[in-house]
Image: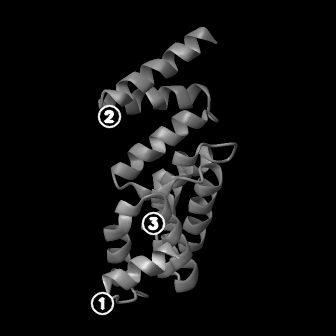
Amino acid sequence: APQREAFVEKARTLDQAGLKPQAREAWQAILKVIPHHQEAAGRLGRLAFEDRDYANAASLLERATASEAPAPTWFDLGLVRQDLRDYPRAVDAYRKALEIKPDHAEAALNLGIVLQESGDPDAAMQAYRTAYRLRPNMFGSIAMALTSASHGRLWLDEAALRRSLAS
């Protein structure tokens, strides 16, 4: 077990140093020996997402969330599903991230975006309200999301939008 922990520590160190190819290799070696290693699957999923390899990222992140996973892993799974336009399952992943970490403002913002894309503007506004309450400086991102989505709403009055988000 100490040797195993040393491998994980090495992978984390390479990851934190931004040495992606070496980190990827280290995480892959861990996953080969321990197929259900959640952190390795989660990190490899994130790296695959950053490489725009969405199918592989989804597979790895689903493996990572098969057992108790931290909010960032669920958030990453939401991002991948969102990019794959699998909105119902992206909603589930973002809700799970928020359930685990209720102050995850990015998860609330992205939940709003996928709900809006799914054609549920009322639920989207609820999510945007949560994001705004958690992080008021997300106002610009929320305003942009509200107007740019296919099911967007145009707000001509910024103050009215702020009031609506604060309600």
Q: CA distance from mark 3 to mark 1?
A: 18 Å
Helix, strand or loop under label 1: loop
| Image disc number at residue 156 | 1
The answer to whether residue 20 is seen in the rendering is: yes
Q: Quadrant of residue 3?
A: top right
Mark linked to residue 132: 3
Is there a contact, CB below 8 Å, between mark 2 and mark 1? no
Residue in the picture at 42% in, 66% down: 83
Residue shown at the point (51%, 22%) measured from the top left = 8
Q: Earlier in the sequence, mark 3 or mark 1?
A: 3
| N-term-proximal mark, 3 vs 2 | 2
Label 2: how many residues lie within 10 Å, few (<14), some (14-19) or many (20+)? some
Secondary structure state at the residue bearing disc 3 = helix
Question: Is 67 positioned to the left or the right of 54 in the image?
Answer: right
Which one is closest to the eye, mark 3 or mark 2?
Answer: 3
Q: Amino acid at mark 2?
A: Lys
Tag nearer the camera, 2 or 1: 1
Residue lying farthest to the right in this orientation: 67
Earlier-in-chain disc, 2 versus 1: 2
Residue 57 image position (x, y, % from top left):
47, 51
Mark 2 residue element? helix
Q: Measured along the vertical axis of the image, is residue 135 above or below residue 115? A: above
Q: Quadrant of the N terminus?
A: top right
Please tell me whether residue 101 is drawn above or below residue 160 in the rendered image.
above
Q: Which mark is residue 20?
A: 2
Image position, residue 141 (x, y; %)? 34, 68
The type of residue carrying mark 3 is Tyr
79 vs 161, nearest the viewer: 161
Q: Residue 42's spot in the image, x, y percent?
A: 52, 41
